[in-house]
Image (cartoon, grey):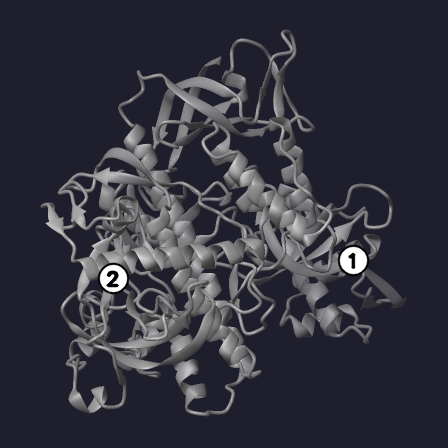
Amino acid sequence: MAKSIKNKKDFDLSSKILKVLSKNINKSLNYKQIASKLNIIDSNGRNQIIRDLKYLHSKKKIKQTEPGKYKFIGQSNYYEGTLDMTSRKTGYFVSPELEEDIFIPTNNLNKALHGDTVKVYIYNKRTGKKPEAEVVEIVHRNKTQFVGVIDIQANFAFVSTANAKMYTDIFIPKDKIAQAKNKDVVLVELEDWPEKADSPFGRVVRVLGKQGEHDTEIHAILAEYGLPAEFPAEVEEFTQKIDTSIQEEEVLKRRDMREVLTFTIDPKDAKDFDDALSFETLDNGNYRIGVHIADVSHYVQEGTILDQEAFQRATSIYLVDRTIPMLPEVLSNFACSLRPHEDKFTFSAVFELNNRAEIVDKWFGRTVTHSDFRMAYEEAQHIIETKQGEIPAIISITSEQQTIEQPIVDSVLKMNELAQKLREVRMKNGAISFDKIEVKFNLDQNGEPIGVYFKEGKEANHLIEEFMLLANRKVSEFIGKQKKTFIYRIHDEPDQDKLFALQNVISKFGYNINLKSKQGISASLNQLLKDVNGKREQNLVDTLTIRSMSKASYSTDNIGHYGLAFDYYSHFTSPIRRYPDVMAHRLLQLYLDNGNSVNQEEYEQKSSHCSSMESLASSAERDSIKYMQVKYMQGQEDKEFLGVISGVTEWGIYVEIQENKCEGMVRIREIKDDYYVFDEKQYALVGQSTNNTLQLGDQVIVNVKNADLVKKQLDFNYIKKV
């Protein structure tokens, strides 16, 4: 009787046999032919092939066409897709060919890791039992570098990661430890996973520092996602040689708008200024508003090492305590940044609007501009609220009381009025208004968190947002209607299953979504977000609603932007920090010059890369926030906090503290006032003796049990339900 393949140490041979037969799907092969293709020449190896052929035949993975000859049984139970690991050392096989994800037990993973592209065999596909999958081939490793803590023994070392989805540690031979010291945080590269080894073999690529130290943990976050911490020396050197002066020869090629009133509105601590607005009142009573964007493509020429580096990065990364820019500082903070009282090369979208905020005329092209004034959002908001230009010291960029000149005050007020009308039309058309509260930290001079504050969008933010949206929309519409290849920012309609799941949760708070039509969904989602504003469940409902949405991405295939209710939309307004905007500038200029449409496939690949890098950057940014939240909560073990249950699972509840939005877990076994069981239908833990429920949105009192900086994880003690 053949041994179970699940426990075979020679699984690799079985999968290699399957691979040979699947590549010769129309042929029948005997053990000698298979041995030849696998370069196996010894008798032991050939005997093992004979045994494995009999086993695979018994499992109906291959068929015997004549004595001693075997053939692959089609593709009916074999699929290619992605491995999605759980934190319990089991996984799920995900494939667009399948309606649902297929469970993979631990002993069927066969050395595949989270995110790997794998080929699997699916059991019980037609028997009515719950199907399970077994990895038969690793087609492509998702990643080969991992961050972890090294444990050095006498003759070898192991590296263990904090990633719950990495189910194995990594064996490091003594001669591949590099300069690492015991318990250092290191970056390791997988090199091999020998057939009979329980763990993969690797080598230390880089020592990141001592575990728990601030810089070590921030660099570990970047390394975990394969993101750079600094620019290569040759890129910095190349950038330093770029002529960043405003040359008259170049000025003559552009529309000169230096005499038009122009200003920037940005966060108080901003260092790079992508965009500026100009304002004029025309003789016919209309308004000419210019959206002026840093002309990065003038300095970042296609094909240079600077351009290659910018493309690889694709985006700036905004960690809690630092920014990892897409472009070196000489460009991002100086030459390209629209700093006040400096002439700058810009790419502009200039609109003539009437008093109803309707577009009467538009113009796109390269310009030279001069910002007359720099404002912070707080200063612009003060003007909007008071209709005055006297700025108190507490919100002034200069930290001293100042008076903003009347022409700028009048421009801000009129532009705000027009922005509100643009927003009103957008919302009527079905746009969804996400104004989710952002958690920000006050840091001391050493980057340590000393306080938490919340950032929410006000009218001044909406003013800038509406004119940036207008430029992005009209640029993409201008090119889209020419049927030429362009890079769009697309957002698909929400998944119905996710909306039903959202409905299930929010109904517990007395809210509903109208799922009957696209317009009804948008209107009811907006109403939901409005209704929860200021309520204890706001952050929970906001988060769940965002999760129910599809993810926005870049593509040359324009399907529109559901969340903004635009048929055409692109990213044009932030080329200092986003590479797709640089591509949009180049393509717009090409088409303004009557150039031919570019190769769509090439730009689709570039779009896909930019989407992937954006996702990695977002993950790193989230991890840095989690890290800082854990750091902020260290030393507060004796304090009790009021929180809201933000998640319920079979292993416990997640609680978000109301005063600082820090989230942690209370494990089910540590809730002592009863024996609790997870009720999936109620999204609740139910006490078996008291029938007490702990469900989404409930207020509870907790304190900090453990703050683990390495895992970026908070554990809470449950004290009581409020």
Relative depth, front residue between 185 and 38:
185
The residue at 64%/7% (across/down) is 689
Which residue is farthest front?
284
Q: Identify the mark at residue 77; answer none if there is no mark.
A: 1
For residue 182, which quarter of the picture? Answer: top left
Residue 514, picture quadrant = top right
Does 273 sit left or right of 391 as displayed? right
Distance from label 1 to label 2 (Cα)? 59 Å
Badge 1, how many Cα within 10 Å: few under 14, some, many 20+?
A: some
Look at label 2 and name its amino acid.
Answer: Thr
Question: Looking at numbered disc 1 in the image, what kind of residue is underneath it?
Answer: Asn
Dot 1 or dot 2: first in sequence order is: 1
Measured along the vertical axis of the image, is residue 332 above or below residue 517? below
Q: Label 2: which residue? A: 264
Q: Position of residue 575 (x, y in %)?
A: 34, 69
The crowd level at tag 2 (other Cα within 10 Å; few <14, some 14-19, many 20+) is many
Q: Is residue 496 above or below residue 488?
A: above
Secondary structure found at label 1: loop
Q: Position of residue 272 (x, y in %)?
A: 24, 62
Residue situated in front as seen by the camera: 159 or 229:
229
Q: Percent from the top left, x then y, of residue 532?
A: 52, 34
Can the viewer see residue 189 in this picture?
no
Q: Nearer the viewer, mark 1 or mark 2?
A: 2
